[in-house]
Amino acid sequence: MLVSEFHFDLPEELIAQHPPPIRGASRMLRVDRTTGVCIDDHFRSLPSLLTPGDLLILNDSRVLPARLFATRAGLHTQHNSPEPTGRIEVLLTQQIAPHEWTALVRPSRKVQPGEVLNFADQTGATILTAEVLSAGEFGERTLRFAPDPRFIEHLDRIGHMPLPPYIHRDQSVPDTPEDKARYQTVYAANPGSAAAPTAGLHFTPEIIAELKERGVQVETITLHVGLGTFQPVRAERLEDIKLHTEHYTLPPATAAAINIALAENRRIIAAGTTTTRTLEHCAAINKLQPHSGSTNIFLSPGHRFRIVSGLLTNFHLPQSTLLMLVSAFLAPPDSPATGRELALAAYAHAVHERYRFFSYGDCMLIL
């Protein structure tokens, strides 16, 4: 299949720039996994659509305020007396070792290995420094920060939420108090993501409590969303797509719940594509006991889902790997192309009915 086959036309005004005024008030498009039939609904109906015994799995990764602004301190040599020059935007995408991170940097051509970046607070005082270790393609850099036990605390002070580029903010105020609260799930627990697991943004404590009261079992995994979320697909064919590696944890309670649900033939509902990829990776490596690891699994039409039987997800970008995942989930085992057709038909319905798209937008439930 070609990446271009997953294109759809999306009016710009349907790209949500802000979350709904009330968390949980989003619309929800219900899609029948077998027939592709679409029903317009609201997210608050979710508890009534799941049944006692269903297992709902959430991604509890917490988004770091990973968007930073730095000044260049010059080359990192003993004989250099650096002078700060220029403002550099740095988006931390993944921690790869103690004190070391991959990042997207712009303007990138000025930031080369050996440079030192200074990160200051509102008073202008430098509170973090990082040396550029290596340069990759498309603005990727590897940074090594000076060791600081208060590193996460400093990020909270000077960092901004890593909003996707299609959410437009005044560059002098890259995020708002609303963004800091709403670009985070209510159950976020483990810091490490460079983007929100957006299907989870719809949940409220009240809706989670209602699900549990109805007999739905709710468990969590952790997958730290990384660089792949920010990079467009540059391949022309699906078989040439390679995703970046992301780190995950399958906790003991969730592993036990999955094995029991599978043994009892109960439905397992994944909240989000990040949860789906983690679960299907664990199935692919035949490792459904508690563990941590990394995955770059790409789920495209033709994949046979071994764990996930229901999917809650937002509406994704044209020609994105996440739209391909949705197409895979809708595809009958013997007809991969049908999944793409059903997914694009559902998206056409959503466009026609003026659903809100992407991170702050509405959602769809596929059962």
Image (cartoon, helix red, strand yellow):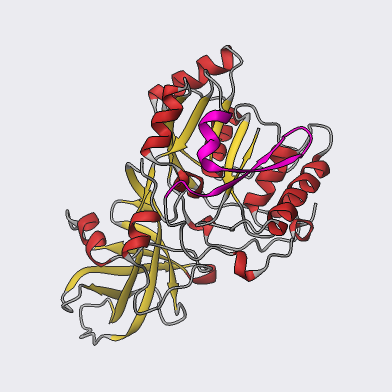
Q: Residue at x 51, y 46 (%)?
A: 199
Residue 249 visible, this angle: no
Tell which of 7 and 133 is nearer to you: 7
Q: Residue at x 67, y 68 (%)?
A: 11
Q: Residue at x 48, y 48 (%)?
A: 25
Tell which of 127 and 268 is nearer to you: 268
Residue 12, how many percent across, how many down? 63, 70
Residue 76, how many percent across, how many down? 27, 76
Using the image, determine if residue 234 lies above or below residue 170.
above
Q: Residue at x 36, y 37 (%)?
A: 205
**Horizontal relation, residue 336 to residue 196: left or right:** right
**Horizontal relation, residue 323 to residue 334: left or right:** left
Q: Which residues are magenta?
A: 23-49
| Residue 44 painted magenta | yes
Residue 45 visible, this angle: yes
Kindly indicate the quadrant of the structure image that contains residue 175: bottom left
Tell which of 323 and 73 is nearer to you: 323
- The image quadrant where one finds the C terminus is top right
Q: Residue furthest top?
A: 264
